[in-house]
Image (cartoon, rainbow, N blue to C red):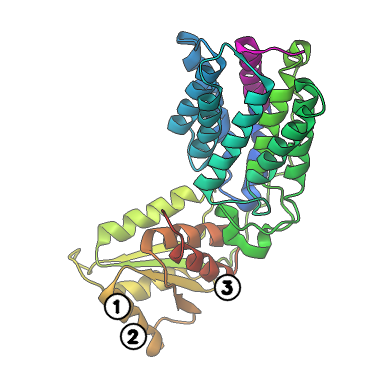
Amino acid sequence: MTALDLAFFRRFLDRATRVIVAEAPYLTDLDAAIGDADHGANLKRGFTSATDALAAEPPATPGALLTAVGVHLTNTVGGASGPLYGTVLRRMGKILGDEPVVEPEALGRALAAAVASVRRLGDAAPGDKTMVDALQPAADAYAEALARGGVTAALDAAARAARAGAEATIPMRARRGRASYLGDRSIGHQDPGATSSALLVTALYEATDPELCAAPVEATEVSAPEPERAPGRVGMVLVSHSRDVAAATAALARALTGTGSPAPVAAAGGLPDGSVGTSAELVRAAVAKADEGAGVVVLCDMGSAVLTVKALLADGSLGTADTRIADAPFVEGAVTALVTASAGGDLAAVLAATDDARTYRKL
């Protein structure tokens, strides 16, 4: 029977790192369709740097190893992947404790606890098109198979279930995460988080075979790059009482789109002389700048910003653009709107995304 000792979990970490490095282009390709196009790059950076960091001070037990990697991922991986994958490994490490050799039943408890923690953190359930769609079936399959046989067969069952779960996300409509901003446009794409989760669970199974772990990793062939998008995306205008707030929010939204060609976003902050206030002149200019013919969504910070835009809409002085005000928080709404527009979402999809941002709970 496979010994779940420190050597086993070191093989798992090494195999997982090599798989992530090899599959980073594939994961990024998946993420480009429905996310920020950074999933593979972020995980590659986190796992490779974790291996380097742990070489200097090697943990002495499986639990300590997983905890250390989890903390490192939380601190170094960008986007949502860092907290989520960090939670998986930290929670597993805590359940495994200080034992030098892990009992198979303890590994099952650790997998179940990790999935429960991720579900709470992301407010996600099976069917939401997230990493949970791979992790939950894996934990369930492991527990069921372990009751019938040994740990190797249980890990094999977990890996198979995780891969099947990832593939099952293709026809799903995303209900959580950045992909949810696309609505029905998320259908037909495999979820990148579920895919990377399946890769990690598979690496856990492969750690039972030292020779397999040492074998080269064959990367999945990625699709051809998307052609440059033609003009015609929804534009976004940010109207704030402060020039700096509007400009900084626009820069943040661009940075979080994960694409080199974000949809147009224009800032209309403050008065023309830079002082605090709202300017009809700046709003008109910003709408004209953001208009590519597919409509413009305007986000306002408060009070007179809303009144100024409403007045301009009422008198028809915003040109030919189909301009709508989004009832959404300024920063969250800006990010969701630009991500959705940059992915090709139409005016209705962008407004729906900002509506989701308005109801997003943080506690």
Q: Nearer the viewer, residue 250 or 189?
A: 189
Earlier sequence position, callout 2 versus callout 3:
2
What residue type is disc 2 on? Ala
What residue type is disc 1 on? Ala
The dominant secondary structure in magenta is: helix
- Residue at the disc numbered 1: 280
Q: For this view, does 116 lie left or right of residue 173?
A: left
Earlier sequence position, callout 1 versus callout 2:
1
Secondary element at image label 1: helix
Q: For this view, does 166 lie left or right of residue 258?
A: right
Q: Position of residue 187 (x, y in %)?
A: 71, 58
**Magenta span:** 1-19
Which residue is found at the position 35% from the left and 79% from the top? Answer: 309
Q: Nearer the viewer, residue 313 or 48?
A: 48
- Residue at the disc numbered 3: 348
Q: Of discs 2 and 3, which sits in the foreground?
A: 3
Earlier sequence position, callout 1 versus callout 3:
1
Q: Position of residue 59 (x, y in %)?
A: 49, 12
Q: For this view, does 248 lie left or right of residue 56?
A: left
Q: Position of residue 199 (x, y in %)?
A: 69, 32
- Residue at the disc numbered 2: 311
Separation of marks 2 and 3 at Cα, in angstroms: 22 Å
Quadrant of residue 284 within the rendered picture? bottom left
Separation of marks 1 and 3 at Cα, in angstroms: 25 Å
276 lies above or below 209:
below
Secondary element at image label 2: helix
Separation of marks 1 and 2 at Cα, in angstroms: 9 Å
Q: Are marks 1 and 2 in contact (CB under 8 Å)?
A: yes
Q: Of discs 1 and 3, which sits in the foreground?
A: 3
Residue lying at the far bottom of the rendered structure:
315
